Image (spheres, rainbow, N blue to C red):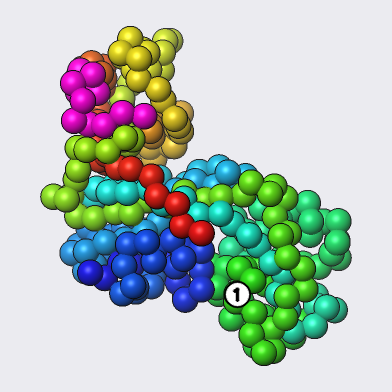
Amino acid sequence: MQVVTLGPEGTYSHRAATAVSDDIAFRESVTNIVEAVEAGEHPRGVIPIENSIEGSVTESLDALAEADVAVLREIVTPIRHALLAQRPDFETVASHSQALAQCREYLAAEYPNASLEAVASTARGVEIAREDPTVAAIGHPQNATDNLQVIAEAIQDRTSNATRFFGIGPRETLDRAGGKSSFAVYPNTDYPGLLLELLQPFADRDINLTRIESRPSGARLGDYVFHIDIAAGLYEDRTQDALADIEELASNGWVKRFGSYDVEHVV
C-alpha cells in the first residue's frame, strides 16, 4: 500500500511514513497530500500535525478541516536536527520554516550573520546545500553525504523536540476504535461563554482534552474552527454523548469527526 508524504526523500515526514509503508510517494505541500488522499490518488498519507517546540502545523489543520478524510493513526518521532554544509563558512541556512524556528536560539548564537531561507522541506534544504557551498541545511544527520558534512549535531533548542504526524486515509476508512480521537467544530456563532459550553460536555463525562486549537474559518474576521483531540475513542458511549451535545450547540455550523487512533513511536 502506497503512502504519500512531504518530499523529497529524506524529510522527517519520510521517516514517519515508513511506519505505514515502504512504498512512499512525495508531494511538495501538506494540502496536496490531503487532496491526493481525498481524491483516491493515494490510499494513505502522512502529514505533520504538531511539534513540541513550535506547536501545531496550521496548514495541516486547515487542510483537514476542508477535506473529507479520516485520521487513522498518530506517529510520534523525535526530531534531532543537524547543521549540514559543504564547508563551515556558509552564508545562508535553508530549511523548512518549522526547522528554522526549532533551531532559532542556536542559529542566533552561533551564526548571527547568516541569512535564513525558508524552503518547502528539510530535504529540499539539503538538496540546495549539496549544490551550493554557500548554503547550509538543517536536517537529520543521516542526510550527510560525501560533499555534505555534519557541522554540528543536536542543534534544536529543546532536547525533547518531537513531532506528531497523522496517518490519513479516505473517509470510508474512519475508525471508531483507539485510545484518542480528533475532530473539528465550527459553531458558526459567537456569544459569551460559547467555548465553555463546547468544552463542558467533556468535563461532565470525565474525558480529558489533550489539545484544543482555534483556526480562522475564512468566512469572516473573528470566526473560528476549533480543532480538538481527546483521550477517548469514538466507540465509547461517553464520547458519543458529548459529541451529541456539541452538535446541538453547533447546529448552525458543523462537527467533523476525523476518527480514533492509537499512538506509535518511530525512532
Residue 17 among magenta residues: no
The residue positioned 46% from the left and 66% from the top of the image is 15
Residue position for label 1: 142
Q: Residues within 10 Å of mark 1 (few under 14, many from 20)?
A: few
Q: Quadrant of the N terminus?
A: bottom left
Residue 56's spot in the image, x, y percent?
50, 43
Q: Position of residue 265 (x, y in %)?
A: 45, 52
Is residue 14 visible to us here? yes
Number of marks drawn: 1
> Which residue is at the front of the view, 80 or 40?
80
Q: Secondary structure at mark 1?
A: helix
219 w.r.t. 120: above or below: above
Q: Residue at x 18, y 64 (%)?
A: 40
**Where does the magenta region start and end?**
231-241
Question: Where is residue 93 shown, x and y percent of the image?
Answer: 72, 69
Q: Amino acid at mark 1?
A: Gln
Please state which of residues 9 and 113 is positioned toward the viewer in this rendering. 9
Give the residue displayed 68% in from the left and 49% down from the top.
Answer: 159
Residue 184 horizontal side relative to residue 146, left or right = left
Compared with residue 199, is residue 235 higher up or lower down, i.e. above or below? below
